[in-house]
Amino acid sequence: QVQLVESGGGSVQAGGSLRLSCRATGSIFGANTMGWYRQAPGKQRELVAAITSGGSTNYADSVKGRFTISRDNAKNTVYLQMGSLKFEDTAVYYCNAAYGSTWYRGPYWGQGTQVTVSS
């Protein structure tokens, strides 16, 4: 059974930084694309960043240059380093796992972690 467990959310002032972590258990991590999505109140869930098992990355235009996604295959963990945070980055952030190399969201989700940026 695949489980994704996020950690690292919290409250920060605008301009600050946070790092999110997502650890995967079960047979999903090795040859799969991991992604971070976010959902703000009243808005649809959107892709923030994703990374394939080979290290290719994809970012939303709104976070390019500010966020960095990375993965540690030995630890079955994917990270999202967020910098220069803005008020509009406030959302619940979800980890996602998809089979193969794809920028489409996969079937597995974490429980979500809240990120709140105060202006």
Image: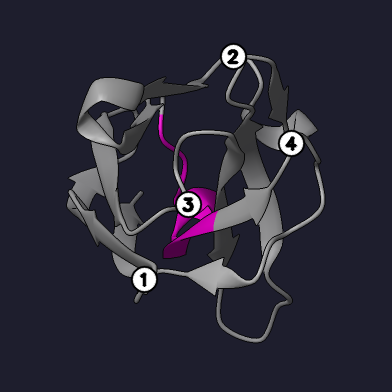
Q: Is residue 54 above or below residue 88?
A: above
**Residue drawn at point x = 74 percent, y = 36 percent:** 60
Tell whether 81 sits left or right of 66: left
Say which of marks 3 and 2 sits in front: 3
Magenta segment includes 87 = yes
- Amino acid bearing label 4: Ala
User: Visible in this render: residue 73?
Assistant: yes
Say which of marks 2 and 1 sits in front: 2
Q: Between marks 3 and 2, how big is the CA–CA gap?
A: 16 Å
- Amino acid bearing label 3: Ile
Which residue is denoted by mark 1 in the rendering?
A: 112
Q: Which image quadrant: the N terminus?
A: bottom left
| Label 1 environment density (alpha carbons within 10 Å; few <14, some 14–19, many ≥20) | many
Q: Between marks 2 and 1, how big is the CA–CA gap?
A: 23 Å
Which residue is denoted by mark 4 in the rendering?
A: 60
Q: Between marks 1 and 4, how big is the CA–CA gap?
A: 19 Å
Q: Which residues are magenta?
A: 85-96
As drawn, the label of residue 31 is: none
Q: Earlier in the sequence, mark 1 or mark 4?
A: 4
**Residue drawn at point x = 33 percent, y = 52 percent:** 117
Say which of marks 1 and 4 sits in front: 1
* Residue 37 locus on image (x, y percent): 58, 56
Which residue is denoted by mark 3 in the rendering?
A: 28
* Residue 76 locus on image (x, y percent): 29, 37
| Label 2 environment density (alpha carbons within 10 Å; few <14, some 14–19, many ≥20) | few
Which residue is denoted by mark 2 in the rendering?
A: 55
Q: Is residue 13 above or below residue 31?
A: below
Q: Earlier in the sequence, mark 1 or mark 3?
A: 3
